[in-house]
Image: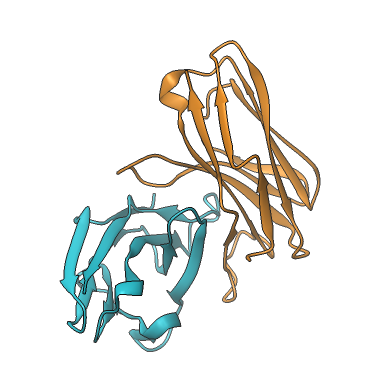
Chain colours: A cyan, B orange
Amino acid sequence: AQSVAQPEDQVNVAEGNPLTVKCTYSVSGNPYLFWYVQYPNRGLQFLLKYITGDNLVKGSYGFEAEFNKSQTSFHLKKPSALVSDSALYFCAVRDIEDTGRRALTFGSGTRLQVQP
Amino acid sequence: ETGVTQTPRHLVMGMTNKKSLKCEQHLGHNAMYWYKQSAKKPLELMFVYSLEERVENNSVPSRFSPECPNSSHLFLHLHTLQPEDSALYLCASSQDIAERPATNEKLFFGSGTQLSVL
């Protein structure tokens, strides 16, 4: 089984400050991990992914995420937030060894609000 | 744009109506998906098609009936829905969906159909 938890419904941050959006996952084997972003009235857009290799992955728009296997976390980060980063962010996981469950499992989303 | 188009953008229907949601992708992908998005709930996978064959069906009520006539088109037929079915229905596509995930695996989403059931 695979699951994702995003413990915060909303994160508020001032423009220019660093931001973190939290995600923890649960899989039986090893994970593929993803972040997607949804702007108002749009579908989800791919932001970044962790497959193997470096634990710190860089993605679009200056975002990065750190894979921590011991804490089963994949938090999304950005050093300096922009007002335009305000959106809904989804974490997703796929268990590499679970061949019976091919599609991604998503979390419930975290709304990021960046104040000017 | 993402290359995945959904119509209609908004739909209001009564519980006895029959309607269909349409999704079309212009990316040459082989896999297509229906997801349900409700506020403050995890994005819920409904159906997955690979090369026009259904490969996953996540215990979705029979009042939702998918159809995939070819790899570019996906439909969701709706019949005798309930008010709790009101949600944003998202279509997505990907290059493939194999038993072992590919390193280039990525989903492309449409903008969704906002469904209200009265």
- x and y percentages locating residue A85 in the rendered image: 34, 72
Instruction: Identify whether B82 is placed above or below A89.
Output: above
Quarter location, residue B9: top right
The residue at 68%/53% (across/down) is B5
Farthest-out residue, top: B16
The residue at 52%/29% (across/down) is B60
* Left or right of A77 on screen, residue B80: right
> How many discs appear?
0
Front-most of residues A15 and B81: A15
Which image quarter holds the C terminus of chain A?
A: bottom left
* Left or right of B81 on screen, residue B71: right
- x and y percentages locating residue A58 in the rendered image: 40, 86
The residue at 48%/62% (across/down) is A97
Instruction: Identify whether B7 is placed above or below B65.
Output: below
- x and y percentages locating residue B88 in the rendered image: 48, 40
Farthest-out residue, right: B70
Front-most of residues B47 and B75: B75
Instruction: Identify whether B47 is placed above or below A29.
Output: above
Quarter location, residue A81: bottom left
The residue at 59%/75% (across/down) is B104
Front-most of residues A76 and B23: B23
* Left or right of B11 on screen, residue A116: left
Q: Is residue B4 visible?
A: yes
- x and y percentages locating residue B13 in the rendered image: 56, 21
Q: Is residue A68 visible?
A: no
